[in-house]
Amino acid sequence: MHSVFELIDRVSKASANVLITGESGTGKEMVARAIHENGLRSGKPFVAINCTAIPESLLESELFGHAKGSFTGAFARKKGLFEEAEGGTLFLDEIGDLDMSLQAKLLRVLQERKIKAVGDNVYKDIDVRIVAATHKDLGEAIKDGRFRDDLFYRLAVIPIHIPPLRHRRDDIPILARHFLQKYGSANNSPVKGFTAAAIEKLMNYRWDGNVRELENIVERVVVLTSKEMVDACDLPFSGSVDSVEDFFASAVSSLPTVSDLEKRYMKYVLEKTGGRKEKASQILGINRRTLYRKEREYGFVLDKRNKKFSPDEDQEEASPISKGFQPQFLSEQELKT
């Protein structure tokens, strides 16, 4: 992968179009963003679109914009993504799924550097760098008549192939730490890193889902773990998981019970309301009689010195997510009224 990083560094300084290829989930959009953010256009917009996420009938309007009254529902002029990305980078993901009609229109834009909105007769100059990506074999698509060869050559001025994660295992620790920092900060997590055993387990895993799967697992571990260091036993797979079924089976085994979550949430509400039963029962959506019963059931006792309810969840054996569960959705106004 070092050669890819070196290539990214070189092409960032250029303005030529880039075509990124690789299996689904290999991090093609991450590479596209890196090219943009390290290049001369970094201060301008980076606009991304997945060509398969929008119906073909609407994709032309989404890319090029439309004039007022150009079709039913077009009540006003709308800028397209080319205009939104002016001066910056437009990332066209899954370009291999673009229909032939739009391929022809995109080719004209790349040749002339002008766009025309749907229903308009005026051409507008554009200054946009195109970075496209696909998981498909465009060479085969060209042979089958499903992709234009002239568009391919316009897009692939600089081709970059991203190998699957299983073929670049040295990148796994770097990516895992990046995602841990990203989601640790976002979730207020105490997790600071991985043990050597955890890193070894990550590097020995197959990663059929590539970078996307790694990101998913690291995010889940950050949310479910209350320790500072993630150990091998905290990772939700055996190290030899080969199927989606095994993946989800391992995920379910680490989930808390409904009782775990109810107990944690009830304790949180009682503490935030200062033990006021009427207010707590309103927030919880139960009557005061049920609240008293639940308090006895869970053994809640208010410590008047620190306004905390025992037993302390941190002292008990609970599921990882139950331990780390700290709701943050009661406003000060809700708690006071």
Image (cartoon, grey):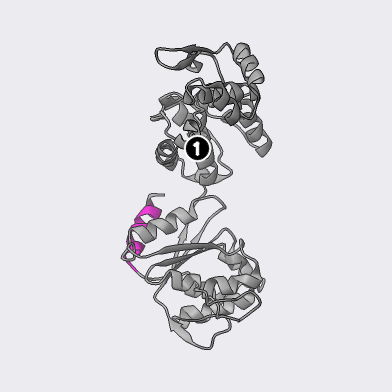
Q: Quadrant of residue 197?
A: top left
Up-down relation of residue 182 to residue 264 (above or below): below
Q: Is residue 162 visible?
A: no
Closer to the camera in the image, 243 or 212: 212
The residue at which mark 1 appears reads as 219
Residue 293 lies left or right of residue 170; in this view the side is: right
Closer to the camera in the image, 30 or 188: 188
**Residue bounds of the magenta highlight:** 3-14
Closer to the camera in the image, 134 or 138: 134
Which residue is most to the bottom? 121
Residue 125 location, x and y as percent? 42, 82
Q: Residue at x 51, y 72 (%)?
A: 80
Up-down relation of residue 190 to residue 89 (above or below): above
Residue 231 location, x and y as percent? 46, 24
Residue 210 location, x and y as percent? 54, 45
Q: Residue at x 66, y 77 (%)?
A: 72
Up-down relation of residue 123 to residue 18 (above or below): below
Numbered marks: total: 1
Residue 198 lies left or right of residue 102; in this view the side is: left
Residue 255 lies left or right of residue 330; in this view the side is: right
Q: Is residue 145 visible?
A: yes
Q: Quadrant of residue 119?
A: bottom right
Q: Residue at x 56, y 38 (%)?
A: 206
Asked whether residue 185 is drawn in magenta, I would say no
Q: Looking at the magenta stretch, what is its main secondary structure? A: helix
Label 1 Cα neighbours within 10 Å, binned few <14 / some 14-19 / many ≥20:
many
Give the secondary structure at mark 1.
Answer: helix
Residue 61 location, x and y as percent? 57, 74
Which three-letter amino acid code belongs to the residue tagged 1?
Answer: Glu
